[in-house]
Image (cartoon, rainbow, N blue to C red):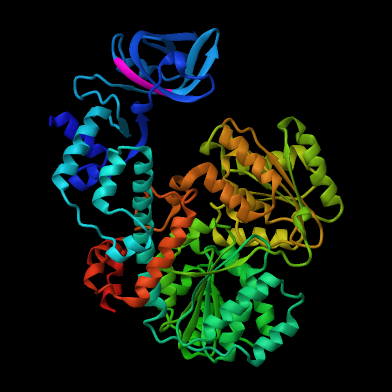
Amino acid sequence: MDARRSEALVKAGIETVEDLIRHYPFRYLDLSMAGAIRDVPLGDDATVVGIVRDVRVKRPRQRLTITEIAIADDTGVVVGVWFNQPYVAQRIKVDDRVAMAGRLELDYGLKQMKTPFLERLDAEDGPTQLGRILPVHRATEGVSPNWMRRLVLEALELAGDVPDPLPAALLVKRALPSLRNSLRAIHFPEALSEADAARRRLAYEEFFTLQLAMALRRHRAVAESPGHAHQVEGERIDALKRELPFTLTADQTSALTEVLADMSASRPMNRMLLGDVGTGKTAVAAFALASVADSGTQAAMMAPTEVLAAQYAGKVGPLLDAIGVRWCLLTGSTSAVDRKASLTALADGSMTVAFGTHALIQEDVTYKHLTLAIVDEQHRFGVQQRLALRHKGEAADLLVMTATPIPRSLALTLYGDLDTSYLRERPGDRGPEHIRTRLVNKTHRAAAYDVVRTAVAAGRQAYVVCALVDESDAAEARAATREAERLRTQVFPDLRVGLLTGKMRPAEKSAVMDSFRSGDVDILVSTTVIEVGVDVPNATVMIVEDAERFGLAQLHQLRGRIGRGEHAGEFLIFADPRTDEGRQRMKAIASTNDGFALAEEDLKLRGEGELLGQRQSGLPKLRLASLVDDAALLDMARDDARDIIERDPHLELPEHTLIATEAWAILGEDETWVRSG
């Protein structure tokens, strides 16, 4: 192989024989079913094979190119049409034999395929394979599809009888083909059904390996450590029930039952509480803190921002005061005097609960007997950070929480080591209609401002959210600092307009939020620093500028900042989406207030590739498995992984040797302690 091709393969991440055989096709050309051009019905997807008769690139206007390639067989002609893809013409010339796959249409009296898949079949660097199913691997510059097929075929020959990491009993149980047969079938199937069966087996293997790693991590955290059996029917829990100013929803009651059952057991809790915005995770957490107080031990609750940590202290703190539980707040802004007093009290055990940020896991913070670690908005922390808080105690219970609804399949993939509890119901009989979402044309800006003015006149408050902080970040977006000045001087000169951005110092942020919370600010212009957890019940209107720049989850989180009190909310979106996906996202956010439904829609629109870009470090790339299409396979893999860890918790049996090596690799070097048992 020449140096140019070798370099191209390395650039594509292909350096070993295994890399090649795991470089799966992304589609197939079924040349055995290729039809004569004359016989293909209009409107059908089809593959045709023919000789290139004409190649043209037209430029009807600026920024538009139209590439047309006409191919013919003995029965007719079809024209492939590509928009703004002039490079297609660079790799095809007249008299080439090609396969073209797409939907056949009639346009201007000509048979056409719009943006079809096109492949040259009689290139010098590879044989034609007419009459067969032709795999299409992702090629790279310098390596044509034909050469990639040839390389993969050679790699399969070199690999021979590849050792199968899946236990034989599992292959039989799930009726899965062997790895050797699956690799051959995924690359060079005799029939498309054969490729489908191979894809299913290889996708299952990806899920199973990942779930096995999660099951190992969970077993180490839960089954191999002597946990603390908390008191869950004590006087402080009873007192909290009396102090709580509302009745728990059915979802809260169910989640609390699961949390307290875990806490009362003699093994550590390892649970995640997923709650849609406004569903009351804080109340569940408060009862867990009360249980710790009844048990005579300590708890720490870590939030990702000082604003959120202070809010929890302000919200839960008074309830703890009322039931006689001592607490403190530790953040980067805590004064030296208060910090010293808190550290002393935590060390001697006289302080029961600590709220805070990363400050809670600093080296000089010690706890006399920490038995519960609560990590809020846990997706903003890495695995090691949440473990660092837990390890401040000995086998402490762990409760991680998020107000970001996560599709179930994504939750199992990212956090398969955690048991899950869900909150979907909102307290206070506030139905979906409590917050009205409207897409507003930018020409109707004045009407949106009237909604704000009406709300303020009624004693309410409003947010205006911008994507960026200042003009230098991007020319088109309404930057927060500029927008705050414009609103203050031109639109609402008679109202009090404040500004909150992530670039402010913590003390400045706290001062602004205190002013807004106390009603001294009517309109708060902000970036997404208010996205998570901020709770101002009097805020009933939110305008979001350039909403197409936000993801669905982010928009839903922002919407959750309004209508948190008795008064209904108005969520007004200014957006100008330029893509189909953008338009679908705006339509979705306007059509439902259900965060979990939006999360599933976001997964469908963006795919796991983009969402898993935010994943915890160490998780492998899913080559074939799809969180959208393979949810049943994921459930199956999770059940099988947990079953194997129950029977062989350290994967010591000979049949588990190969799969164990892959699972350890996922956990990474920093978690090799799992092996020690």
Depth check: 326 or 407 in front? 407
- Residue 485's place in the image compared with 310, above or below, is above
Quarter of the figure with residue 578: top right
Q: Which residues are magenta?
A: 97-101
Q: Quadrant of the C terminus?
A: bottom left
Is 33 left, or right, of 338 in this rendering? left
* Left or right: 639, with 283 as reference point: left
Magenta span dominant secondary structure = strand
- Is residue 76 visible in the rendered structure shown here? yes
Give percent across and percent down for residue 67: 43, 14
**In the rendering, at what x and y percent does residue 186 appear?**
31, 42
Question: Relative to residue 164, is residue 218 drawn left or right?
Answer: right
Check the image and report above or below for 17 versus 209: above
- Which image quadrant: the N terminus? top left
Of 140 and 570, nearer the camera is 140
Taking depth in this image into account, of 556 and 213 the one nearest to the observer is: 213
Residue shown at 44% from the left, 58% from the top: 634
Tell me: 580 left or right of 456.
left
Q: Residue 75 lies in magenta, yes or no?
A: no
Image coordinates of residue 566 in percent, x first then y, are: 81, 62
Quick check: can you spot residue 61? no
Where, by quadrant of the figure, is residue 209 drawn?
bottom left
* Position in image of residue 100 (x %, y %): 38, 21
Closer to the camera, 416 or 32? 32
Image point (32%, 32%), residue name: 133
Q: Residue at x 51, y 19 (%)?
A: 41
Quarter of the figure with residue 448: top right
Q: How many marks?
A: 0
